[in-house]
Amino acid sequence: MVEAKYVVGLSEEEKDPNYKLNEGLDMQLLLDRLQLITGVKLIPSAAIYRAGKGALLYTDIEHITTVTHHMHIVNYAEGKCILPINQAGRR
């Protein structure tokens, strides 16, 4: 089932049905990434992963910032402008 959902990106070991994907996770890295992507900053005691600690509570949140996701629109537009100039120069 995992292989059907994630066609690329799994190693041969991870494709084995008996392999436990959750055992290979770096939970601290996952927690750090969660904070980065969501803009939620946890208090220091909650920001360090401890096995069996339990669920995060709203009191574990230090502050929340706005995270803007974009598609690098400026870079895309700039590239779209430069491409014809580049192609004209090659002719």
Image (cartoon, rainbow, N blue to C red):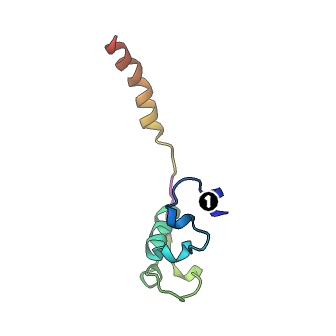
Please give the name of the residue rendered at 44% of the width and 36% of the height, measured from the top-left corner: 74
Rendered residue at 48%/70% (across/down): 30
Q: Is residue 18 magenta?
A: no
What kind of secondary structure does the magenta stretch mostly adopt?
loop
Question: Is 66 a magenta residue?
Answer: yes
Q: In the figure, is residue 4 to the left or right of 28?
A: right
Where is residue 91 shown, x and y percent of the image? 34, 10
The single residue placed furthest to the bottom in the displayed view is 52
The three-letter amino acid code for the residue at tag 1 is: Glu
89 displayed left or right of 48: left
Counting labels gives 1
Left or right: where does residue 52 sit relative to residue 43?
right
- Residue 62 position within the rendered picture, expressed as x and y whole percent measured from the top left: 48, 76
Q: Nearer the viewer, residue 68 or 81?
A: 81
User: Front-most of 85 and 70?
Assistant: 85
Quadrant of the snapshot with the N terminus: bottom right
State the image coordinates of residue 21 (x, y, percent, origin top left): 55, 72
Instruction: Count neighbours of disc 1 (C-alpha within 10 A) and say few if under 14, some if 14 to 19, many if 20 or more.
Output: few
Q: Looking at this view, is 16 or 56 the one in front?
A: 16
* Looking at the image, residue 78 lies above or below residue 85: below
Please tell me which residue is depicted at 45% across the width and 34% down the height of the picture: 76
The residue under the point 51% across, 77% down is 23
Range covered by the magenta-colored residues: 64-68
Provide the residue designation for mark 1.
Answer: 3
In the rendered image, the residue lying farthest to the right is: 1
Name of the residue lying farthest toward the top: 91
Q: Position of residue 25 (x, y in %)?
A: 49, 73
